Amino acid sequence: MKRYLRSFTLIEILLAMTIFSLIGLSLYGTFQSGIAINRRSEGIDQVTRESSWALDQLTRDLENMTGYDFSNSYPKLSACDGRANKITLILPVHDRLKAVTYFLTSPGNSFIYQTIMGRHTLKNVALTNQVQQEGRLNLFVREETDFVDYLQSSETKKTQRDVLSARVIEGSLKFSYGYLHGEGPSASILWKDSWKDQYIPSRVRVEVAFRGSGKDEKPVIFKKDLFIPTGFLGMEDH
């Protein structure tokens, strides 16, 4: 009696290899998509945390700034020097007065202290410029100066600079200040891009755009109106 050995034909082997390859490619694609989604989610969370920290720091300083009368000794100074892309305020820090300024600056080759979620680095670090699709990125900086040095307006004054964010789009930081428009019940708030009064403003609007986590991500734009309880509305004719 003859025995016949059963085996796979070449066509069956090729068909099996093709099926396994398709299954493998499908699993690999699903795995890669999961990794990409996870990385994108982590990037969004990082942008959100960084932007929230920067704006929270700015909000705290604006809400706690104090008035100071410079009119007698330093008439060119004011308790709040508000400009379209920069603001300087007087802030009590550890029973001392400090002049605190918020602005954007290009990284360039300068060395400054970097702040990551409220923690200072141990030494100066150099940050390189970055260019993305939506525009060049700037550093969002908080500069703190001793009150005495601020009064002297010396170029050699000692300042401490902290980087609140390194992913702010160039030119996106904008400040506006509330002025009283009209009289009586029909009065409203008019927003202007400068503040030069001796007292501090009661309304400050902040707009800033942060670069997304990826090259194709759209910028995250924040707009916030702040109320300073100890401030005043400006007069429209100023």
Image (cartoon, rainbow, N blue to C red):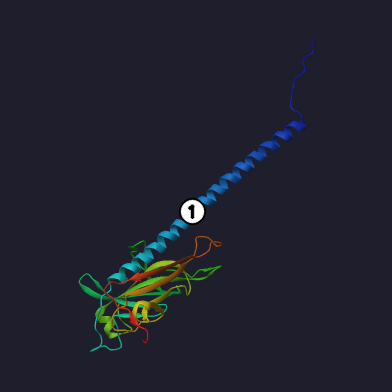
Q: Is residue 199 above or below residue 114?
A: below
User: Residue extending furthest top?
Assistant: 1
Q: Residues within 10 Å of mark 1 (few under 14, many from 20)?
A: few
Q: Please report the residue visible at 64 percent of the width from the left and 43 percent of the height from the top.
A: 25
Taking the image as shown, residue 188 lies to the left or right of residue 211, namely: left
Query: 208 or 40, which lies in front?
Result: 208
Residue 105: x %, y % from top left: 43, 75
Please name the residue that numbered disc 1 is placed on.
41
Does 77 sit above or below residue 111? below
Q: Quadrant of the C terminus?
A: bottom left
Residue 179, by quadrant, is bottom left
x, y (%) of residue 50?
41, 62
Say which element carries label 1: helix
Which quadrant is the N terminus positioned in? top right
| Residue 39 horizontal side relative to residue 144, left or right | right
Residue visible at 79% across and 13% down in the picture: 2
Question: Of the residues shown, which amino acid type is indicated by label 1?
Answer: Ser
- At which x and y percent is residue 75? 28, 89
Query: Residue drawn 24% across and 80% down?
Result: 68
